[in-house]
Amino acid sequence: MAKVYATGKRKTAIAKVWLKAGSGKLSINGLTLDEWLGGHEAIKMVVKQPLNLTRQESSVDIEAKTLGGGYSAQAEALRHGITKALCTFDPTFRATLKPHGLLTRDSRVVERKKYGKRKARRSPQFSKR
């Protein structure tokens, strides 16, 4: 089968994912997963979650490009992209991934700051005198 493309998003991060049948190589921004995330083991598990659930760790090659946001949001965007690509690659994976909430785009983003406030909702400290 040819390459499958999917886009994953989280906060302001975007992950472009290309998935193809292979030997289990993971390349993110030209780096391996360990080089890209360093010692963040919990976040590495987040990225690998869809592959572990579908038992595809050693049968697909993933090439990804991430941009925007921080490394945590990029990792979650990557997870979303991998999940979407796996569902396109083999539609039977959808039944496995959907109950874990991996197909849902997490739409929570930072609320904008409003005029007259210190943050989005925090008011300046009240002073009686």
Image (cartoon, rainbow, N blue to C red):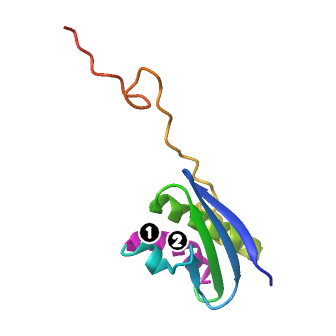
- Look at the picture and state if 112 lies above or below 62: above
Q: Which residues are magenta?
A: 40-56
Q: Which residue is mark 1?
A: 43
Residue at image position (37%, 28%) is: 118
Number of the label disc, if any, that sits on residue 71: none
Q: Which residue is situated farthest in the left direction here?
A: 129
Q: Between 56 and 78, which is closer to the camera in this rendering?
A: 78
Instruction: Answer with the quarter of the image where residue 26 lies.
Output: bottom right
The answer to whether the residue labelled 1 contacts the one labelled 2, judged by CB atoms less than 8 Å apart, is yes
Query: Can you say which quadrant of the picture contains the C terminus?
Result: top left
Q: Is residue 44 magenta?
A: yes
Residue at image position (59%, 89%) is: 58
Q: Is residue 69 left or right of residue 38?
A: right
SS under mark 2: helix
Instruction: Answer with the quarter of the image where residue 125 lies.
Output: top left
Percent position of residue 121, x then y: 42, 28
Q: Between 90 and 73, which is closer to the camera in this rendering?
A: 73
Residue at image position (63%, 56%) is: 104
Instruction: Answer with the quarter of the image where residue 34 lies.
Output: bottom left
